[in-house]
Image: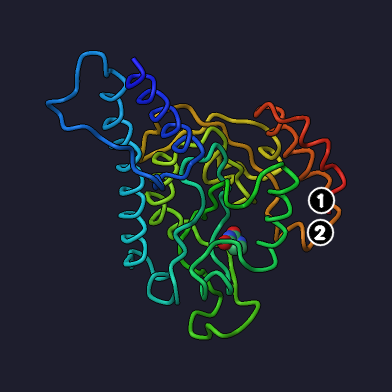
Amino acid sequence: MQKARNLAKELKNYLLNEEEGFFIAKKPLKTKKAETITKKDTAQKIVPKVKTVVKDKAVALSELIEQIKKCTRCELGKTRIKAVPGEGNINTKLMFIGEGPGFDEDRQGRPFVGRAGQLLDKIIVAMGFKREEVFIANMVKCHPMKEPNNPEKHGNDRAPNQEEIALCRRYIEEQIALISPDFIVALGSVAGRSLIKDVPTFSAIRGKIYDLNLTYATPAKPIKILATFHPAALLRNPAWKKDAWADLKVLLAAMGREHKSQTNEKQG
Ligand code: URA
């Protein structure tokens, strides 16, 4: 009896670790040899299944990252310094999707690490999360430049074009389907109009919750998506910050997190 209780306790702790998104278990669960498992040890039988599912997701995402790093489907793959696949908690409920890497991201291989990224970090905290709790990615994985022959030039960023978005689309869709968050924030017009609806004006879709429909991948469960201003747009037009915050409060309400949003009302 005591043995069964210990097993149940061990399983509960293991599952709690998985729930928190730390998919690499620090302390592997002790396993018995198959032939010693008795009928009473039903909990023990669940463990390998949970482990396999979690591990497959991590493996599939790392394989995708390797493909992205080698990709030259479009011209951006030929001029980039580093591909920027995305980063964060692969078991998150909340994902942020921007348009494409800029100068700093191209050099570091990480999303949103420049000035717009610093503002995104503040937005994430204002929403009641830590950056490492969410997943951050972009519609295209390599730096779109106005002058690709002049990569050291500052102010050389541009939005990805339709062809680049189309050729890169499978990557973000597969990431979404594997991570399977409950909610996505599309940052700016490129992500919003690519993932929600290609409308002539971004304001037609901003601040509303939609059901996400993907073309190439099928997430395990329905995902809600809301678009708001891109942090770079907020740096150019600080007056839009209050509208962005109003949009994000719609999302927080849908997530059942109104309380946290109120406490962060004054965040810059
Ligand atoms: N802008 C984006 O859309 N993505 C980044 O990663 C950085 C800036």
Disc 1: which residue: 240
Between 236 and 259, the residue placed more toward the observer is 259
Amino acid type of the residue that numbered disc 2 sits on in the rendered structure: Asn
Coordinates of residue 222 in the picture (x, y in percent): 48, 27
Coordinates of residue 69 in the picture (x, y in percent): 36, 66
Q: Is 31 left, or right, of 176 in this rendering? A: left
Between 130 and 153, the residue placed more toward the observer is 130
Residue positioned 64% across, 81% down in the render? 154
Q: In the rendered view, would you say 187 is above or below 177?
A: below
The quarter of the image holding the C terminus is bottom right
Asked if the residue under mark 2 is in contact with the one under mark 1, i.e. CB atoms within 8 Å, the reply is: yes
Coordinates of residue 107 in the picture (x, y in percent): 52, 76
Q: Is 17 left, or right, of 98 in this rendering? A: left
Amino acid type of the residue that numbered disc 1 sits on in the rendered structure: Trp
Between 157 and 184, the residue placed more toward the observer is 184
To which quarter of the image does residue 259 belong?
A: top right
Q: Secondary structure at mark 1?
A: helix
Residue positioned 52% across, 62% down in the render? 160
Quarter of the picture for ligand 1? bottom right
Q: Pointer 2: residues within 10 angstroms few (<14), some, or many (20+)? A: few
Disc 2: which residue: 237
Coordinates of residue 1 in the picture (x, y in percent): 33, 14
Q: Pointer 1: residues within 10 angstroms few (<14), some, or many (20+)? A: some
To which quarter of the image does residue 251 belong?
A: top right
